Image (tube, helix red, strand yellow):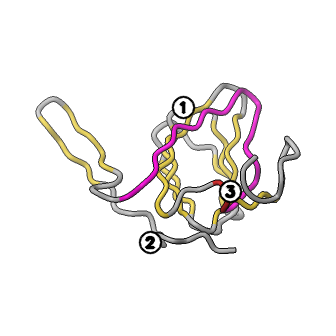
Amino acid sequence: MNYATKPIPAEKPPVTFVERPWGSFRQYAFNEETTVSLMTVKPGQRLSLQSHTGRAELWIVLDDGAVVEAGDETFHPKAGAEIWIRANERHRLSSSGPEVRVLEVAFGNWQQEDITRYEDDFQRPERGEG
């Protein structure tokens, strides 16, 4: 089933860098409808290998030690890295040891029902909440 009820960008939206006398900021979504989540992964744990039909996600890595699977690639991003997860792309976030945090900016319709799990360490259902 397709849960896309809102526009989902095919490519990573532009990120605006703004300098001010006191420093700077990066703006990830300017007046756009998004859902922002702060994900925390416990040491040595991982999320399910999953995909979503109703959203694309921009992951902003906050801590070193994250491992990201996206499509057929595995990344070991440093803090500050940005990773674009397209709608329907298989992906997973893991911790290689320390607790890691990733800020997720989701574009589209964020809902648990659009999750398809391909692998899961906690025996949660293949689809939906869990």
Tell me the residue that label 3 is attached to: 91
Q: Start and end of the magenta stretch?
A: 33-51
Question: Which residue sits at x=52%, y=49%?
Answer: 59
Magenta span contains residue 3: no
Q: Residue furthest right?
A: 123
Quadrant of residue 47 within the rendered picture: top right
Residue under numbered circle 2 = 7
Where disc 1 sits, the SS reads loop
Q: Is residue 1 left or right of residue 102?
A: right
Q: Residue at x 61, y 33 (%)?
A: 40
Classed neighbour count for the residue bearing mark 3: other residues with Cα under 10 Å, few (<14), some (14–19), many (≥20): many
Distance of label 3 from label 2 (alpha carbons) = 20 Å
Q: Tell me the mark number nearer the camera, choosing from 2 and 1.
A: 2
42 magenta-colored: yes
Q: Could you say which disc has been placed on residue 71 in the image?
A: none
Q: Earlier in the sequence, mark 2 or mark 1?
A: 2
**For the residues carrying marks 3 and 1, which lies nearer the camera in this image?**
3
Checking the image for residue 63, the label placed there is: 1
Q: Quadrant of the N terminus?
A: bottom right
The answer to which of 79 and 6 lies nearer the viewer is: 6
Q: Closer to the camera: disc 3 or disc 2?
A: 2
